[in-house]
Image: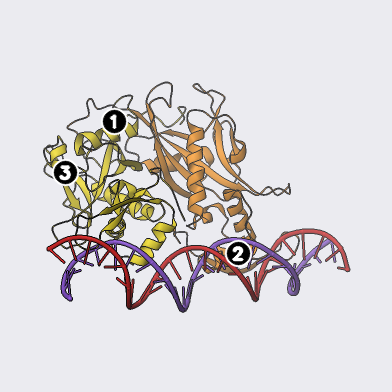
Chain colours: A yellow, B orange, C red, D purple
Amino acid sequence: MNTKKGGRAQRPLVTVDVLVFTVAKNKSQKQPNDLKIALVKRAIPPFKGKWALPGGFVKENEPLEDAAKRELKEEAGVRNVYLEQLYTFGNPERDPRTRVITVAYFALVPTDTISLSAATDVSEAQWFPIKNLPELAFDHKKIIQTGVERLRSKIGYSNIAYGLLPQKFRLSDLQKVYEAILGHKLDKRNFRRKMLSLGLLEETGQKDKSGPGRPALLYRFGTKEVVFFD
Amino acid sequence: MNTKKGGRAQRPLVTVDVLVFTVAKNKSQKQPNDLKIALVKRAIPPFKGKWALPGGFVKENEPLEDAAKRELKEEAGVRNVYLEQLYTFGNPERDPRTRVITVAYFALVPTDTISLSAATDVSEAQWFPIKNLPELAFDHKKIIQTGVERLRSKIGYSNIAYGLLPQKFRLSDLQKVYEAILGHKLDKRNFRRKMLSLGLLEETGQKDKSGPGRPALLYRFGTKEVVFFD
DNA sequence: TGAATAGTGTCTTTCAGACAATATGCC
DNA sequence: GGCATATTGTCTGAAAGACACTATTCA
């Protein structure tokens, strides 16, 4: 940062947009779980009636990450979830009204989190499967693409999947999260061998007897710090 | 992005800062090559006399990446080099004067590129080894840390090393680049086996006879698109 | 022929990928 | 016993890591 050149100091608008991901359980259907993202319906122009990422302006003296956390709470009703900065989108034409630079964050919320509509103060908020997105406002389609790529990549060499699961979970739940994000099936034995060998999981000693069939051992992540492996 | 909430629309200053990395040849000394970064000496307050990343304000209607390219040309005298967005730093206290959000980019320039002092219009610009940085203005130390981490990580699973080498180079040059970035020695045989097995290198058919000892075959990268492996 | 750098092969271990049968709990 | 899900082991091929000697050029 340097004040001695670059012409007039422009003051663009700066927003944060948050990609809130979850993996839905789809209890009712027999279908595999889906990676979903939370979107809100725009009540005003431009793009009135189109769906968009939850987001808003960064306030004076507000750190960027705090702004993202505020949007998460206000628009998705969640807090204390995994959050990381994704990318900054600043194309001058991305908002038809004026120059708006947006810092995109992505968040992971567990499946068992309270439902969107109940928790948010936004008129309409809804989960959409990544594979079936509605028409989106601004450049939000591209932002979501970027976020999905980051998530797909990062789940392969880190433990951030903890952000998508409840405290205690079955190994089959963990596998379903991976399959939903990667978009393909995984071999059960190889998956379990790999996950257990990483040393990031702890047995809780408890069993889950809620479903049919043999009860599964419940595991937890030993740490909620982000750990990279490979 | 959402205009219906978030209080007054603040208009912070937005800058780009560029981390220009190179690996210096250090021909004279027997020492291993160093990863270096280009810094400029600040001529005005705040932090007058301290070293800082080259950077400047984003102009009206200027895409962020164009702003980074402009700074690269103006302050480091290079163009057509590898450039990627790194991270956005927006802590309200990072500039003592006013709210300034900076989008950091990092660039890789080949060792044989024209020297900084000759090419730049900045009063003082200089290469500093990452291991021996001067006192830095603003939060630039943290920004550089973030950039070095990204570079260390990314060189392990991509071909971006092409950005640090001339068109034709010896495999030992490539190895030195890896060693400088990773900060430790690599086994020559394993390194060459791995690099050649990736299929990203082509023989030029030429040999380098400039140094002492047996002449080395010269290679080039088959593509300058970013390729990920592993 | 000595100095300097380039170039090469094998062994071992680890990890990924393919693959199917047995165990447990509930009705 | 039948159903549904959980849990477990082996083989094979690929890649990583450790390790040392020969080849080429020039002074």
Q: What whole-number distance in Å separates the C-alpha atoms at marks 3 and 1?
A: 26 Å
The quarter of the displayed image where residue B172 is located:
bottom right
Q: How many marks?
A: 3
Residue at position x 26%, y 48% in the image: A21
Query: Looking at the picture, how far across and down is residue B88, in whole percent?
Result: 39, 37
Instruction: Name the element at disc 1.
Output: loop
Q: Which residue is mark 3?
A: A115
- Quadrant including the N terminus of chain B: top left
Chain of residue at mark 2:
B
Query: Looking at the picture, how far across and down is residue A71, in whole percent?
Result: 24, 35
CB under 8 Å between discs 3 and 1: no
Query: Label 2 amino acid?
Result: Asn
Instruction: Name the element at disc 2.
Output: helix
User: Which of these two is toward me, A208 or B226?
Assistant: A208
Residue C26 in the image: above or below residue A147: below
Q: What whole-number distance in Å separates the C-alpha atoms at marks 2 and 3?
A: 52 Å
Q: Is residue A41 left or right of residue B37?
A: left
Query: Looking at the picture, how far across and down is residue A95, in whole percent?
Result: 23, 40
Q: Which residue is mark 2?
A: B190
Query: Looking at the picture, how far across and down is residue B43, in whole percent?
Result: 54, 25
Q: Which residue is mark 1?
A: A58
> Dot 2: few (<14), some (14–19), or many (≥20) neighbours within 10 Å?
few
Residue at position x 44%, y 50% in the image: A228
Instruction: Name the element at disc 3.
Output: loop
Chain of residue at mark 3:
A
